[in-house]
Amino acid sequence: MTITDVARAAGVSIKTVSRVTNGVATVNPEMAQRVREAIEELGYRPNYLASHLKSGTSPRTIGFIAKDLSRVHSADIFAGISTVARRHSAQVITASTEESESSGEDLLVAEELARRGIDGLLVMATGGDYSALASATFRGIPRLFVDRGVPGEDAVVHDDVDGADKAMSTLIAHGHRRIAHLYSSMTIPTMRGRHLGVDAALRRAGHLRSQAPRIAGIMTRDVAAETVGHLLDSPNPPTAILCGSSEILFGCVRELLTRGRQDVLVAAFGTEKDVELLPLPVVLVETDGFELGHIAANALFQRITRGGTETRRAVLPASVREVRPLGPSADV
């Protein structure tokens, strides 16, 4: 869809369309409204980069809506995306949004990226409805969700259910019966998947839920440490703890080491670099953010260059192993 198509549909000149899309206030209001309606109807996306490029051709640009880039996992995903983008001589516009029960902030950012003329979009989903991405505003922009799947959308994710099932089963196989499992926000698809996996392992082993307290809403290391402290001070403290994220793991380990409680076995989602220097064993469910980002970006550029509309979902298998302090690790 071109600016000429918009001008023809609105019954105005190309110059008028350009002035409207660039926010010029002196355009006749009636004409401006016709232009805006034509843009919405046709799904036209102005290319804001073109006027700045001497060559007359613009590099591809993709958008990445991330969740808290200060966290290791999000930063690793971005690194994987950036590696692929550089190979395609493409630019990555990145925005970091908050975890939320609503998709509203993500959709507002996505609309702004669409106005900037991106060629593709990668999203780390939060809670809420993303069906607005099917509207005319995003027509012609391939999109793909990474790390967190959304029903009916392309996605590259880890098998969180199977990973959590295997991790909890490993703790049970070690003889633990009172096992706490800790999560961040349950609006996050990965957290819900991990809880499903834990629940499946507990049911299969015949464990009562009262033996395995679930605590959610742990968003920082400090809160994780405080939560673990309360659990250890309870009348029936856990002998093992499953951490739903690396942030929770770091807070959990800090509290265990402060109390000298290396007897509590820990399982966690993360990478080997998260746990290799810890002075206690960890049952690790490997979640390689770089690999996620790399695969997702490759899939997105295939959509950009080759087209295609079928829904694809890539699920990376769960790898679970026990990492021992400064020693060899064993697959489990």
Image: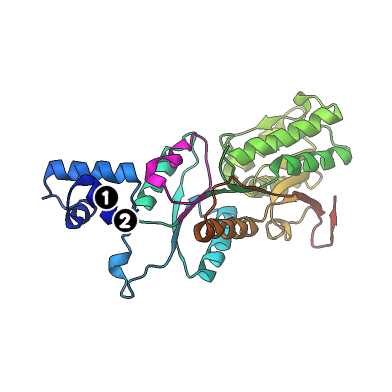
| Amino acid, disc 1 | Val
Residue appearing at x 35%, y 46% in the figure: 43
Residue farthest to the bottom, as pictured: 55
Question: In percent of the image, x 69 and y 43: which residue is there?
Answer: 160
| Residue 225 visible in the shown view | yes
Q: Which residue is drawn at 64% across and 35% down?
A: 192
Residue 322 in the image: x percent, y percent?
A: 81, 52
Mark 1 secondary-structure assignment? helix
How packed mark 1 is, by other alpha carbons closer than 10 Å (few <14, some 14-19, many 20 or more), is many
Give residue 148's position: percent from left, percent from top.
59, 44
Percent from the top left, x then y, of residue 271? Answer: 69, 56
Which range is magenta?
120-143
Q: Is residue 132 magenta?
A: yes
Q: Name the residue under label 1.
A: 6
Q: Which of 301 and 186 is in front in this view?
A: 301
Asked whether 316 falls inside the magenta stretch, the response is no
| Residue 232 visible (yes or no) | no
Identified at 53% across, 64% down, the residue is 82
Residue 2: mark in rendering: 2
Quote the CA–CA distance across marks 2 and 1.
7 Å
